Every structure is written in structure tokens, then in C-alpha cells.
Image (spheres, grey):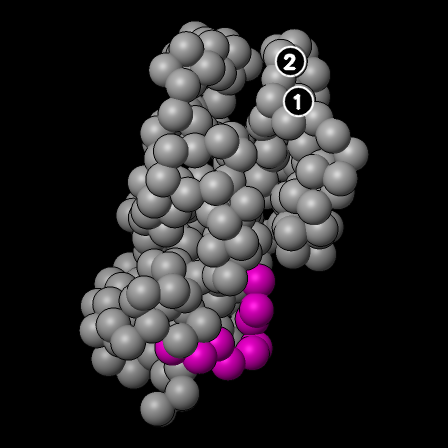
């Protein structure tokens, strides 16, 4: 089944080729886009740069325990995580859920149950009714459909530009610090890379502001961070 760019993307972090192949067939058959990582380090990097909608994480990885991967992700990301493991004891499930996992599925598993659990996770992660559409000036951002328009015409943003705008939109009116934005969008190792923000804010202003050099909506709080003003 072909997939469209707006469909949810699932990252599978598992070192078993056969499991990754099975998950790809199951998920793509249900209309999801799928990316794969065969180690914990690669999975963390993928979450940081690709911003998937959900993660399926195996606990038995060759380089890092799945629990350690989860802990590192939860330092800076709230991406929904479904644990997939041969370990089915209650204490292991409880530990994973307490550490920040959203759900836990034991191998072997049925494709139907996996898909059902993913649907529940993704529904929980959807914006609330009052945050489905954000408007400022001539710009409208549909957070569910991931469509941005200006004066009724769709504006094409890169995935990172959209992720930055989304972060500002769901926190509209609040100042988001440089460090918070960098951790959320680029991961914990990027906290000092403020040049990233200048570049991406500049691009957003060029595409969304009437006067990019005198922004009305995408405001800079000097030495602190940025905020989106709704008018």
C-alpha cells in the first residue's frame, strides 16, 4: 500500500531483521510510513532528526538496553513509545511503563493487536479540540492535518520548520527558551547550537510574516528565546 506524506510515521527500533520486516509489512499495510533503526543509538538519532509520530521499541538491543533508550528519549521527547519485548513478566512491564513507555506488547504478537494499540497511542497524542487549528494574522496551522496556509494558500514547510512552528503554536503566547527548543527539536546534545534557531526562525519569517525583518507574530525575546503572538 502506498502512503501519503501526511500519514503517521512509525519508527521501529529492533535489531532482528525478521521482526523489522514483519512490522514494516504490517504497518505499511495499515497505511503508516515506516522507518527502521537496528540499535539504540541509531534509534535515538532517528527520533531527534526525523520526529516520528510514534516509536516501537524492543528492549533487547545490542548496544543499549531498551530501558536506557527510553530514559534518554524521555529527557527531551514525549513521542509515544510502544515497548515490544519477549520479556512479559509484570515487574518488567511496570518498570517500562513507569519509565515513560505508553504501552507494552509481548512477543509473539498479533498484527491486529499491535495496530489497535498504536491507534490508541496516536489518538492520545492528538491535539485537544481547542488546539486543532492555530491562527495568527493571515496564517492558519491545522495541527491535525499538518497543513499551513497563508491568505488561504498552502505554505510548504520542511519537517524541521513545521516542528518548530508546531512547538511555538501549542505554546502560543509563552516564551520558549533556546535550550528548550533545541532539546525538543534536535536532541540534548544540541543545546548550545543557537545558530540552528536563527536559521530556521528566519526561514519561517520569510514564509509567514508580511515583513520578515519586522516580525509581528514570530517574536524574539532577546537572550531568552522565542514566542508566537496570536492576533
The magenta stretch spans residue 73:
no
Q: Is residue 5 visible?
A: no
Q: Residues within 10 Å of mark 1 (few under 14, many from 20)?
A: some
* Magenta-colored span: 170-178
Residue at point 34% right, 44% down?
A: 41
Residue at the far right in the pictured view: 90
Q: Is residue 173 magenta?
A: yes
Indicate the quadrant where residue 90 lies.
top right
Q: Residue at the spot x=60%, y=33% of the render?
A: 83
Residue in the picture at 66% in, 22% down: 106
Mark 1 secondary-structure assignment: strand
Q: Decide if residue 158 is on the left or right side of residue 98.
A: left
Q: Secondary structure at mark 2?
A: loop
Number of marks present in the image shown: 2
Q: Quarter of the image holding residue 188?
A: bottom left
The relative height of residue 65 versus residue 62 in the rendered view (above or below) is below
- Which quadrant does the N terminus fall into? top left
Q: Which residue is mark 2?
A: 109
Q: Is residue 210 above or below residue 116?
A: below
Q: Which mark is residue 106?
A: 1
**Is any atom of residue 116 visible in this view?**
yes
Residue 169 place in picture, x, y as percent: 52, 63
Amino acid at each position: 500500500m502506498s502512503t501519503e506524506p501526511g500519514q503517521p510515521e512509525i519508527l521501529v527500533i529492533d535489531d532482528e531483521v525478521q521482526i523489522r520486516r514483519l512490522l514494516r509489512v504490517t504497518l505499511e499495510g495499515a497505511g503508516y510510513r515506516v522507518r527502521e533503526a537496528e540499535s539504540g543509538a541509531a534509534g535515538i538519532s532517528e527520533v531527534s532528526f526525523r520526529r516520528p509520530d510514534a516509536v516501537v521499541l524492543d528492549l533487547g538491543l545490542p548496544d543499549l538496553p531498551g530501558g536506557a533508550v527510553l530514559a534518554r528519549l524521555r529527557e527531551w521527547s514525549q513521542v509515544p513509545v510502544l515497548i515490544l519485548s519477549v520479556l512479559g513478566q509484570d515487574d518488567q512491564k511496570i518498570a517500562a511503563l513507569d519509565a515513560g513507555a505508553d504501552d507494552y506488547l509481548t512477543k509473539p504478537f498479533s498484527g491486529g493487536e499491535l495496530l489497535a494499540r498504536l491507534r490508541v497511542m496516536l489518538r492520545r497524542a492528538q491535539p485537544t479540540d481547542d488546539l486543532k487549528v492555530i491562527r495568527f494574522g493571515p496564517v492558519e496551522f491545522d495541527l491535525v492535518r499538518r497543513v499551513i496556509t497563508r491568505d488561504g494558500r498552502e505554505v510548504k514547510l520542511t519537517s524541521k520548520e513545521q516542528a518548530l512552528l508546531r512547538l511555538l503554536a501549542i505554546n502560543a503566547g509563552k516564551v520558549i527558551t533556546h535550550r528548550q527548543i533545541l532539546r525538543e527539536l534536535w536532541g540534548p546534545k544540541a543545546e548550545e547550537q543557537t545558530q540552528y534557531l536563527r536559521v530556521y526562525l528566519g526561514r519561517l519569517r520569510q514564509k509567514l510574516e508580511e515583513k520578515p525583518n519586522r516580525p509581528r507574530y514570530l517574536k524574539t525575546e532577546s537572550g531568552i528565546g522565542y514566542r508566537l503572538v496570536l492576533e
